[in-house]
Image (cartoon, grey):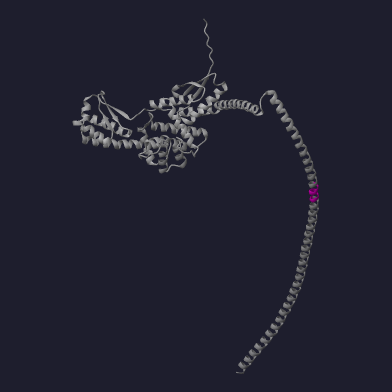
C-alpha cells in the first residue's frame, strides 16, 4: 500500500516536473518567436521606408521630366507662333506690294484702253472711208458685196463638205464594209442550207381519177366529213390526178394531206373512218411538232426552254413567210446571230436563242391584233425568257426601242436570211410598187430628167440635165436620194444609186 502511494506521489511529481519543464520551454520558445517577429517587422519597416523613398524619388523624377517636356513643347509652340507671325507679316507685305503693282497695272490698262478706243475710232473712220471708196469703185453696196461673199463661201463649203463626205464614205467602205461582208459571208457559209417553198395551197397526187369519186363519196358526204374534221377546203376539179387542199393554216393542210394518204392506201373511205383517221393523224402531227421543236433546240445547243415555246418552234416547220420556210429561216437567223456574236465577242448562246425565237409570234395560237414581233416578245416574257432576249425579239422590226446589244444583231441577221438570193418570193404587186416608189423619189428632185430601177430594185439609175446641175451637185444629189430611200422605204439588202450627167454635142455633115 505504501509502495503504491509512493509510486503515485512519484508519478505526480514527475508530471509536475514535466509540466514545469514544458512551461519553461514554451516561454523560452515564445520569447524567441516574439524576438524574431520583432526583428522581421523592423526589417519590413526599413524595407518599406526604403521603397517609399525610392518611389518618391521616381515620382519626383517623372514629374520633373513631364514638367521639362511641357516646357519644351511650350517653347516650341512659342517658336512656331513667332514664325507664323513673321510669315504673316511677310505675306501682308507681299500683298501690299501686289496691290500697289495691281493699281499701277490697272492705271496702265486704263490708259491703254483709252488709246485703243481712240485708235478704234480712227480705224472705224478709215474703214468707213475705205468702204465708201470700194463702193464707188465696184459699184456695189456693202450688203450686196457681203451677200456675194456669203454665196461664194457657201458654195465652197458645200463642195468641201461633199468631198469630205465622199472621202469618209470611201474610207468606211474600205474598212467597215469589208469586215461586215467578211462576217456575213462566213456566217452564211457556216449554215448554208436549202429553203423550201410553201404557200397556202397543197396538192395531193392520186394514181387515177377513180379515187376522186371515192373521196367525194355519195352526194359528197365523204368530202364534207373530211372538210369538217380537218378545217381545210378540199377542191376537186378537172386537174388530172390531183386534189387541191386550201387553207391558211399549214398544220391543218398537213393533217388533211396525211389523212387523205392513209385513207387512199387503206381503201376504206366513209365518214366514221375519216374521223378516226383524222384524229389519229392529228395526234401524230402534234407529236411530230413537239419532236421537231426538241430536235431543233438540241441541234442548236439551246437548253432550258419552256415546253410551249419548244412546241411553237416545231410548229414553224409547217409555216412559210414570203415563200421561205419559217423554221429554216429561224435556224438560219439563229446560226447567223451566233456567228456574228462570236466575231464581236458577245454572248453566243443568248444570240442564238434570240435568233431562233425572233419570229415565234407568227405561229402563236393566240389571235391578237398586234405585230408578230411584239406578240413574240409577249410570249417570251410569258414563258420566262430573259429581258434582253425578249427585247431583241420585240425590236427586230424597229417597232420598239432596242435596249440590248443583241437586238441589232437579230435585226441584221433576219434581214440577211431574208435577202439571201432565192430565200423568199415577193408578191408581184409589192415588187412593182417598190420599183415605182424608187423612181418617184428620184424624180421628185429638181434637175432629174429620167430614172430607171434596175437589178430587181437593187440599183437606181438617175439621169440629170447637164445644164441644170454641176458635177459637185450630182454627188450631193446621190447622197440625198440614198438618205431619203433609207428613211422612207423598206427593202432587203442595199440599193445602189448612180447619178449620170453627160453633155452630148450633135452635128450633121451635109
Pick whichever, 45 or 184, lies toward us. Answer: 184
Q: Position of residue 426 (x, y in %)?
A: 39, 27
Pick whichever, 305 or 397, lies toward us. Answer: 397
Pick whichever, 295 or 451, lies toward us. Answer: 451
Q: Is residue 239 left or right of residue 180?
A: left
Residue at 66%, 28% (x, y): give it.
Answer: 142
Answer whether residue 157 is magenta in the image.
no
Residue 388 is at least partly visible in this image: yes
Work out which quarter of the rendered image holds the N terminus and state it: bottom right
Q: Residue furthest bottom?
A: 2
Q: Position of residue 262 (x, y in %)?
A: 25, 31
Extent of the magenta region: 91-97
Q: Quadrant of residue 145?
A: top right
Residue 495 is at least partly visible in this image: no
Residue at 73%, 77% (x, y): give it.
Answer: 36
Q: Position of residue 415 (x, y in %)?
A: 45, 30
Q: How many marks?
A: 0
Q: Position of residue 409 (x, y in %)?
A: 48, 34
- Residue 397, placed above or below residue 135: below
What type of secondary structure mainly makes up the magenta span? helix
- Residue 14, placed above or below residue 301: below
Answer whether residue 95 is magenta in the image.
yes
- Residue 403, placed above or below residue 16: above
Q: Quadrant of residue 133?
A: top right
Amino acid at each position: 500500500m505504501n509502495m503504491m502511494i509512493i509510486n503515485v506521489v512519484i508519478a505526480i511529481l514527475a508530471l509536475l516536473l514535466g509540466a514545469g519543464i514544458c512551461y519553461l520551454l514554451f516561454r523560452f520558445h515564445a520569447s524567441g518567436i516574439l524576438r524574431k517577429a520583432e526583428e522581421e517587422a523592423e526589417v519590413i519597416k526599413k524595407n518599406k521606408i526604403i521603397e517609399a523613398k525610392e518611389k518618391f524619388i521616381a515620382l519626383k523624377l517623372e514629374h520633373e521630366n513631364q514638367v521639362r517636356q511641357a516646357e519644351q513643347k511650350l517653347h516650341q509652340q512659342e517658336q512656331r507662333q513667332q514664325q507664323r507671325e513673321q510669315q504673316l507679316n511677310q505675306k501682308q507685305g507681299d500683298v501690299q506690294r501686289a496691290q500697289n503693282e495691281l493699281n499701277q497695272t490697272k492705271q496702265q490698262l486704263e490708259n491703254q484702253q483709252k488709246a485703243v478706243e481712240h485708235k478704234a475710232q480712227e480705224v472705224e473712220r478709215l474703214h468707213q472711208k475705205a468702204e465708201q471708196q470700194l463702193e464707188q469703185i465696184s459699184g456695189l453696196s456693202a450688203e450686196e458685196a457681203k451677200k456675194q461673199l456669203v454665196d461664194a463661201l457657201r458654195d465652197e463649203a458645200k463642195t468641201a463638205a461633199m468631198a469630205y463626205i465622199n472621202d469618209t464614205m470611201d474610207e468606211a467602205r474600205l474598212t467597215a464594209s469589208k469586215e461586215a461582208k467578211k462576217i456575213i459571208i462566213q456566217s452564211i457559209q457556216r449554215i448554208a442550207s436549202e429553203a423550201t417553198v410553201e404557200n397556202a395551197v397543197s396538192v395531193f397526187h392520186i394514181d387515177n381519177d377513180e379515187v376522186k369519186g371515192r373521196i367525194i363519196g355519195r352526194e359528197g358526204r365523204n368530202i364534207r366529213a373530211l372538210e369538217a374534221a380537218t378545217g381545210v377546203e378540199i377542191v376537186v376539179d378537172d386537174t388530172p390526178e390531183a386534189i387541191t387542199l386550201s387553207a391558211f393554216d399549214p398544220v391543218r393542210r398537213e393533217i388533211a394531206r396525211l389523212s387523205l394518204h392513209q385513207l387512199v392506201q387503206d381503201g376504206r373511205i366513209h365518214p366514221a373512218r375519216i374521223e378516226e383517221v383524222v384524229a389519229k393523224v392529228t395526234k401524230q402531227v402534234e407529236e411530230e411538232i413537239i419532236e421537231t421543236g426538241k430536235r431543233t433546240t438540241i441541234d442548236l445547243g439551246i437548253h432550258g426552254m419552256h415546253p410551249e415555246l419548244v412546241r411553237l418552234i416545231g410548229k414553224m416547220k409547217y409555216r412559210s413567210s414570203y415563200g421561205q420556210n419559217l423554221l429554216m429561216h429561224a435556224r438560219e437567223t439563229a446560226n447567223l446571230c451566233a456567228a456574228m456574236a462570236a466575231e464581236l465577242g458577245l454572248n453566243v448562246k443568248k444570240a442564238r436563242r434570240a435568233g431562233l425565237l425572233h419570229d415565234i409570234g407568227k405561229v402563236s395560237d393566240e389571235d391578237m391584233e398586234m405585230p408578230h414581233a411584239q406578240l413574240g416578245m409577249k410570249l417570251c416574257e410569258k414563258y420566262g425568257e430573259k429581258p434582253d432576249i425578249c427585247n431583241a425579239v420585240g425590236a427586230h422590226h424597229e417597232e420598239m426601242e432596242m435596249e440590248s446589244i443583241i437586238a441589232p444583231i437579230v435585226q441584221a441577221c433576219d434581214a440577211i436570211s431574208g435577202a439571201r438570193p432565192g430565200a423568199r418570193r415577193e408578191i408581184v404587186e409589192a415588187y412593182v410598187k417598190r420599183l415605182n416608189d424608187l423612181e418617184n423619189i428620184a424624180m421628185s428632185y429638181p434637175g432629174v430628167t429620167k430614172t430607171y430601177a434596175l437589178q430587181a430594185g437593187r440599183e437606181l439609175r438617175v439621169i440629170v440635165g447637164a445644164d441644170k446641175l454641176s458635177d459637185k451637185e450630182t454627188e450631193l444629189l446621190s447622197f440625198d436620194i440614198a438618205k431619203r430611200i433609207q428613211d422612207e422605204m423598206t427593202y432587203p439588202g442595199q440599193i445602189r444609186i448612180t447619178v449620170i450627167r453627160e453633155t452630148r454635142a450633135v452635128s450633121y455633115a451635109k
